[in-house]
Image: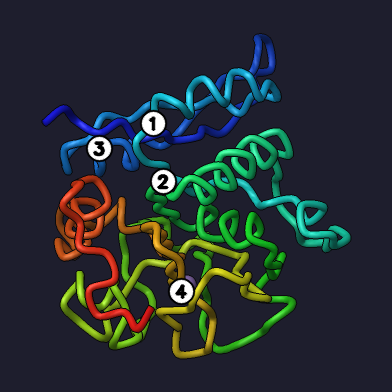
Amino acid sequence: MPHPIIGVPTSTALEPWYSPSFTLPSSYLHAIEAAGAVPLLIQPTTSTETLAALYSRCDRLLLAGGEDVHPSAYGAAPHPKLELTNPQRDTAELWLARRALADGMPILGICRGMQLLNVALGGTLYQDLADERPGPIAHTFGDTRRDFRALSHSITLEPDSWLAETLGIGELAVNSLHHQAIRDLAPGLRVVAHAPDGVIEAVEGTGAGFVVAVQSHPELIWQDTDPRWARLFHAFVQKSVKWKVKSKE
Ligand code: MN
């Protein structure tokens, strides 16, 4: 069987003396390549013709981490602590996500990717979690802790979720590198994991298509810190994925 092609929208890095570069941390690509897929990087272009042409080559869509989603995408005014945004990337990813959702193409979202997915379906975000929803858990790293693989808080998985079934566990520790999070959950998504402070840490689609998204960064820890996460990438990539094994859908 040929390797499935996974579309992965990229970010933009501004170059002071040259044209902008399109970039993506290699950890996302390594994780899906190791699971048997071929990544297809998709630039955040404003051309829907280009997006449509690239999308038509894809078997799956991976929405990766990155900049803050601009609040104009969900009708909110910018919070003073909104960080770097990339409206062009927002537009491209929202187009790709909605197209994939409509087509039933499998989608995996990670960090910003989970937030983007929620926005694509009509949900909203906390723009700065610490300010808008203060709590005992630091979901983002301070300057003193820079190892992004370090596990920093636990999450509790819904026992009847696909993710709990796949990881084979109901509670586990995750890394946490986000200052934004889902505020109002969009229709079509179901919360399948919370942090102890109630912050949403994973969602699944309620429809027929494979839609899974996590707030943590399994692409950084599946090789060593917690190999159970390799199952997520494997399941996403392999066509034999058993979706909704125990779902009540
Ligand atoms: Mn977190």
Question: Badge 2 is on which residue?
Answer: 105
Q: CA distance from mark 1 to mark 3?
A: 17 Å
Q: Are marks 1 and 3 in contact (CB under 8 Å)?
A: no
Q: Earlier in the sequence, mark 4 or mark 3?
A: 3
Q: x, y percentage for residue 112?
A: 54, 54
**How many numbered callouts?**
4
Say above or below: 195 vs 34: below
Q: CA distance from mark 4 to mark 3?
A: 23 Å
Q: Nearer the viewer, residue 145 or 50?
A: 50
Question: Badge 4 is on which residue?
Answer: 201
| Quarter occupied by residue 214 | bottom left
Q: Residues within 10 Å of mark 3 (few under 14, many from 20)?
A: some
Question: Badge 3 is on which residue?
Answer: 30
Q: Earlier in the sequence, mark 1 or mark 4?
A: 1
> The residue under label 1 is which amino acid type?
Cys
Q: CA distance from mark 1 to mark 4?
A: 27 Å
Q: CA distance from mark 3 to mark 2?
A: 21 Å
Q: Earlier in the sequence, mark 2 or mark 4?
A: 2
The residue positioned 44% from the left and 54% from the top of the image is: 109
Q: Earlier in the sequence, mark 2 or mark 1?
A: 1
Q: Nearer the viewer, residue 28 or 108?
A: 108
Say above or below: 2 vs 8: above
Q: CA distance from mark 2 to mark 4?
A: 22 Å
Question: Badge 1 is on which residue?
Answer: 58
Q: Earlier in the sequence, mark 1 or mark 3?
A: 3
Q: Are marks 2 and 1 in contact (CB under 8 Å)?
A: yes
| Quarter occupied by residue 128 | bottom right
